[in-house]
Amino acid sequence: MSTVQIKTPASRDDPSQVKIEEIPLPPQEMWLELENREAVPAASSELKLEAAEAQKPEPELQLEFIGEGHFRVVPLKYGFRLDGAAVSSVTVRRLTIGQVDILLKRLATTTISTFEIYSEMTSLPVAVLRGLIDEDGDAVTDAAYDFLPRALKTADALQAT
């Protein structure tokens, strides 16, 4: 007969005070018959969906920025073809507050690389950025790093991969 240990609280005020008990488990072939979780009612799932939709941020307005301080065109010493098109320069753009917000929310749940941020800034896939020849890669990542917001420059938040 299989048993399992359970911890039962022994004090209301001190969560570390527990009573450990061993209880017997039914035979494994009976486990499916003993399934007692209720199906989620449709109304409940609809409420959860409405709540999730209510938490979605408003879409950001696509602004037409004036001047050239919000982007930098980096000429490539070693141009390449991407999907048949010749690429001789990479445009690095500053992130909008909305884009920074999305990245910070991702950072709250996982670690992202600087290349993922640079990908957002250049509209190029991470694999393309990693495939640049070192001189061009350095020039593009230097320009992108200059445009990183303070919140994304912290060494603790990012992994340089």
Image (spheres, rainbow, N blue to C red):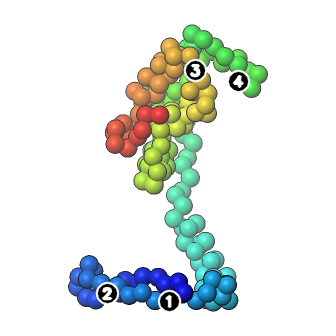
Q: Nearer the viewer, mark 1 or mark 4?
A: 1
Say whether residue 99 is visible: yes
Left or right: 150 with respect to 45? left
SS type, badge 2: strand
The residue that appears at 30% across and 84% down in the rendered structure is 18
- Vertical comparison of 94 with 91: above or below: below
Q: Which residue is mark 2?
A: 19
* Residue named by callout 3: 132
Which of label 3 and label 2 is nearer to you? 2
* Left or right relative to 121: residue 159: left
Which residue does the numbered mark 4 point to in the structure image?
82
Q: What amino acid is found at the position of numbered circle 4 in the picture?
A: Leu
Position of 123 with respect to 97 (left or right) is right
**Residue on which the image places disc 1:** 24
**Circle 1: is it few (<14), some (14-19), or many (20+) Cα within 10 Å?**
few
Identify the mark at residue 110; answer none if there is no mark: none
